[in-house]
């Protein structure tokens, strides 16, 4: 029940420090998780991307980890923490570096409007999108050049 030992057959060691060699669930202590089972407490290195409830780990396959600090290597959605976003996926919170100009929910980025030259809709360097609307309520059936709307935004 107590003491320091090496768990060689996967039984549940309640206290102490051990090395988990078969991935069974150990309730307390510090161990190295070699097969990605869920460990409730302690500090470990997650080698297969399973969900660990607490602790500090390095996420090597981009699975969702609920707490801790990790580096997201494939752009999956992480709920909390600090990461570097390498493929521009949408991350809900945290601090990141966006390397491909995609739209992130938070942070500061530079986003252009697709298909525009910037002549009519200059891009906003703070990452917000300015919405432009066209008013087509002026007698759309009138057959005059002045009343026709060029949907490309050109006069």
Image: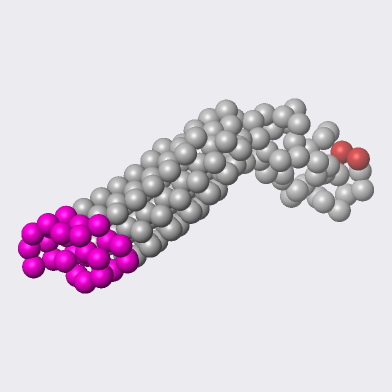
State which quarter of the image contains the N terminus: bottom left
Query: What residue is at 67 percent from the left and 29 percent from the top?
Result: 122
Q: 78 or 144: nearer the eye?
A: 78
Residue 51 in picture, x, y percent from top left: 37, 61
* Colour pattern of the rendering: secondary structure
Apparent side of residue 113 relative to residue 44 in the rendered image (left or right):
right
The answer, for residue 31, to whether it is visible in the render is yes
Q: Quadrant of residue 15?
A: bottom left
Q: Quadrant of residue 86?
A: top right
The segment highlighted magenta reads: 1-29
Residue 67 in picture, x, y percent from top left: 31, 52
State which quarter of the image contains the C terminus: top right
Query: What residue is at 78 percent from the left and 38 percent from the top?
Result: 153
Query: What residue is at 25 percent from the left and 66 percent from the top?
Result: 8
Most distant residue in the left direction: 2
Residue 137 in picture, x, y percent from top left: 74, 50
Q: 131 or 137: nearer the eye?
A: 131
Q: Quadrant of residue 71?
A: top left
Residue 132: within the magenta?
no
């Amino acid at each position: 029940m107590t003491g320091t030992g090496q768990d060689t057959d996967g039984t549940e060691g309640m206290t102490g420090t051990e090395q988990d060699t078969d991935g069974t669930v150990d309730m307390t202590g510090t161990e190295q998780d070699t097969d990605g089972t869920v460990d409730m407490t302690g500090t470990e290195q997650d080698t297969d991307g399973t969900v660990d409830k607490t602790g500090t780990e390095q996420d090597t396959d981009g699975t969702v980890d609920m707490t801790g600090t990790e580096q997201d290597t494939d752009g999956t959605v992480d709920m909390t923490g600090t990461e570097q976003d390498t493929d521009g996926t949408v991350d809900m919170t945290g601090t990141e570096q966006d390397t491909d100009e995609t739209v992130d929910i938070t942070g500061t980025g530079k986003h252009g409007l697709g298909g525009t030259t910037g002549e009519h809709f200059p891009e906003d360097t703070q990452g917000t999108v300015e919405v432009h609307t066209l008013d087509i309520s002026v007698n759309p059936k009138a057959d005059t050049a002045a009343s026709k709307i060029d949907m490309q935004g050109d006069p």
